[in-house]
Image (tube, rainbow, N blue to C red):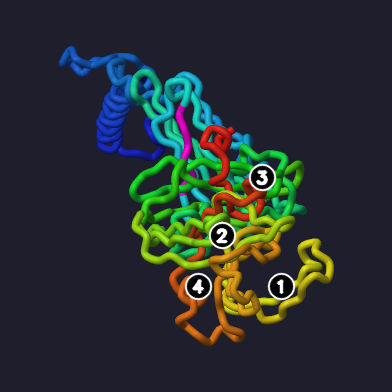
Amino acid sequence: MNVRPISGASAGGRGRGRKGLALIAGALLVTLTACGGGDSGSGTGSGSGDGKSKDSGTSKQSTAAVTISPKSGATGVDTSGALKVNVAKGKLTEVTVKDAKGAKVDGTLTGGGASWTPSTHLAAATKYTVHAVAKDSEGREAAEDSSFTTLTPKNTFVGSFTPEDGSTVGVGMPFSVRFTRGITAPQDVEKAIKIKTEPPVDVEGHWFGNDRLDFRPENYWKSGTKVTVDLDLDGVEGRDGVYGEQHKKLTFTIGRNQVSVVDAKKHTMKITQDGKVIKTIPVTTGKPGYDTWNGQMVMTEKLAVTRMNGETVGYGGEYDIKDVPHAIRLTDSGTFIHGNYWGGDAFGNYNASHGCVGLRDVRGGYDKDVPAAWFFNHSITGDVVVVKHSHDRTVDPANGLNGWNMSWADWKK
């Protein structure tokens, strides 16, 4: 290397300059050697020259590719069928879907971990976040995050239900829901209503028309059973373009077992609790041409006093009693078991009503010792009244909460 002396430098300065340049050149050589990644003299270097160790494969990017549908930021997303998580060249190990309140959405892995779908519908007008993790064949992880918002429906429906949250009811009480719109997707709606019991018992639903759904076990509930209902209709498309807007959780408890058997031929009613007869009461039932329905009827409503007008049940002006005491509804069509202060000596002797079951009472219902008052005070909604030996047919299962008049096989159809 020829180095030209700096102009004006002394001879001594020229000597020092050559030494300094030599040192600089040596430093450059060391630096270039180190950056080149050459052999350090130990014999263990990789010498790959690409910045990655040959035996450090875990540092490579995962080959698993996670995709989330719908795309992040999407709005107006359908509440069913739109959310899917898939992975190529790997298996999903974690999928977490939450709404804005942090509530998680349950889902199911299929295809050996190749895809994930929610196990239920999503709520309407709700923002969801998705976090998905997958591993490739070498155990390397890949993750993907997304968020989207479901549609806001223009048309909605709700369900009115019985019994009420926190109530104690009789052994015959089904869980019944009546919808504000006719349902054309019954399976989706029924799937959205989850019922659990303690102790466990099989509970099945049955549709009456397209606007009512009842749930019951095969036989009367056992006393003490706790029933929990998750009425998750929010986001369910019950009919084309019509979505549920209701999500409510409730519980009710089954009380003591009371079943009362009316014998229309003998004009008596035997009240049983837990299978034992606790009282027998003389009654009057429907006279010829107005016979009382046969069958099992569930108490749905208790009224200390009510008005009964024949015009409301198709009997014209045959009667209009403004102060019927101790009335308990048995059918939607107007069958009651109630106090009767005008029946004379009919109780226990002959049938004189227009189809109801009458018990002796006093006008105003003030006497707590008469049979009607006793029965009213010892009954709760959900108790069962069974009528037999009447000359009429069995009550229609849809007339009131009277599905017990169907076989279990027919109920599950």
The mark nearer the N terminus, 4 or 1, is: 1
Task: State how far apart marks 1 and 2 are (Cα).
Answer: 24 Å
| The label number, if any, that marks residue 308 in the structure image | 1
At label 2, the amino acid type is Thr
Task: State how far apart marks 4 and 2 are (Cα).
Answer: 20 Å
At label 1, the amino acid type is Met
Label 1–label 2 contact, CB within 8 A: no
- In percent of width and height, residue 295 lies at 57, 49
State which quadrant residue 245 falls in.
Answer: bottom right
At label 4, the amino acid type is Phe
Q: How crowded is mark 4: few (under 14 residues within 10 Å), some or many (20 or more)?
A: many
User: According to the image, label 3 marks what residue?
Assistant: 208
Left or right, residue 177 beside residue 318: left
At 36% across and 17% down in the image, what residue appears?
A: 49
The mark nearer the N terminus, 1 or 2, is: 2
The mark nearer the N terminus, 2 or 3, is: 2
Label 1–label 3 contact, CB within 8 A: no
The mark nearer the N terminus, 3 or 4, is: 3
**The N terminus is located in which quarter?**
top left
- In percent of width and height, residue 92 lies at 43, 28
Q: In this view, does 10 lie above or below 395?
A: above
One can see residue 245 in this view: no
- In percent of width and height, residue 338 lies at 59, 70
Range drawn in magenta? 104-109
State which quadrant residue 311 falls in.
Answer: bottom right
Left or right, residue 176 beside residue 93: right
| The label number, if any, that marks residue 376 in the structure image | 4
| Nearer the camera: disc 1 or disc 2 | 1
